[in-house]
Image (spheres, rainbow, N blue to C red):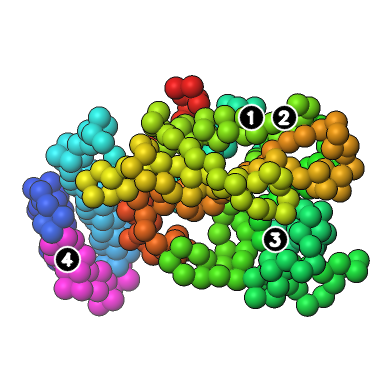
Amino acid sequence: MTDLTTLEAELMTAIAAADTAQAIEDVRVKALGKQGAITTLLKSLGGMSPEERQSEGPKIHALREGVTGAITERKTGLERAALDAKLAAETLDMTLPAPAFPQGSVHPVSQVMDELAEIFADMGFSVATGPEIEDDWHNFTALNIPETHPARAMHDTFYFPDKRDGKDMLLRTHTSPVQIRTMTSEKPPIRIIAPGRVYRSDSDATHTPMFHQIEGLVIDKGIHLGHLKWTLETFLKAFFERDDIVLRLRPSYFPFTEPSVEVDVGYSIEKGRRVIGGSEGWMEVLGSGMVHRRVIEACGLDPDEWQGFAFGTGVDRLAMLKYGMDDLRAFFDGDLRWLRHYGFSALDVPTLSGGVGA
């Protein structure tokens, strides 16, 4: 029989000399594989006499356990050394900037909504909201819009087939119902803006069936058209961030205001592009006027005591004018290329935190 002491010495020397994972695997196969030296010894036990098996068996099993333990220990040591070497070679510099990850952006409409809210907050306005599904009283009747007005026609307004409490239901065509709800639920003085989605049956490069609007309302004593002009001028200067904003108020007609005025803003041509500011030409940007007596009365207020003004404009159009966009439909297409180009970083959006006086 092979000298077990000699075999053990040879195997332990080979295990100690193994310096790679493959080398230690070769030693394991040589000792414990199907044709390995220790495996051969274990197979030979079956041909021994009971006396020899009782004498040699424990020795062979002890050899197998000793060699197995040594191989496992050496393998663990090699793996630990390899990991240490890898960690030493692949150091991580925590001062390096983190890799860029895909991220979303703030939609231009959301950005402009925030800018408008900030501007008007500086002027003492609060934000008021209301339902997008309205009844015809809040959307039309209370605003002095007669039954025969074209805005009530089916081709202009999205009506629901069912009535609610005997009233026609529709998708609001403007945020003016928010003004009515505020005047009927709060006591004056009132100073609010009403931003939100509105719906009209229209679609082309400058119109979409759903768009965003912001309206303003002031109800107080002694309010006149001069207050309206100052408010609009201050607002437009802050929003477009230019001091050369020039306004032109043209007489107009709206059922809910009297007198009513369309507001034009001067523009100039810079590098072949029309830019708000200056007075080379005029562009209509919003409608406004003094709140009609009938609207004030419909809300339960005395028009001889309380007066006010209101104005409204499209948020999407303001975004187009300020940030150089030429097609309103792109706002709602969901094209990621457009959003990446015109969107704002959530951590680096332009703000007007300096206030309207900045």
Disc 1 vs disc 3: which is toward the camera?
1
The reply to whether the C-beta atoms of the residues labelled 2 and 1 are less than 8 Å apart is yes
Residue at the (28%, 45%) spot, across then down: 269
Name the amino acid, label 2: Ile
What residue sits right under mark 1 in the picture? 227
Q: Could you tell me what secondary structure mostly forms the magenta stretch? A: helix
* 179 relative to 113 in the view: left or right: right
What residue sits right under mark 2 in the picture? 223
Which disc, if any, is residue 172?
A: 3
Neighbor class of circle 4 (other Cα within 10 Å; few <14, some 14-19, many 20+) is some
Q: CA distance from mark 4 to mark 3?
A: 82 Å
Query: Which of the pair 11/156 is nearer the observer?
Result: 156
Q: CA distance from mark 2 to mark 4?
A: 99 Å
Q: Tell me the magenta residue range.
A: 25-51
- The image shows residue 230, relative to residue 151, as above or below, that is above
The reply to whether the C-beta atoms of the residues labelled 4 and 3 are less than 8 Å apart is no
Disc 3 vs disc 2: which is toward the camera?
2
Name the amino acid, label 4: Val
* 205 relative to 221 in the view: left or right: left
Magenta highlight on residue 32: yes
Question: Tag 4, which secondary structure?
Answer: helix
Upstream in the sequence, badge 1 or badge 3?
A: 3
The reply to whether the C-beta atoms of the residues labelled 1 and 3 are less than 8 Å apart is no
**Where's residue 259, x and y in %?**
68, 44
**Where's residue 325, x and y in %?**
37, 55
Question: Tag 3, which secondary structure?
Answer: loop
The reply to whether the C-beta atoms of the residues labelled 3 and 2 are less than 8 Å apart is no
**Residue 146 seen in the current view:** yes
**In the picture, residue 127 is in which quadrant?**
top right
- The image shows residue 166, relative to residue 72, as above or below, that is below
What residue sits right under mark 4 in the picture? 29
Which disc, if any, is residue 215?
A: none
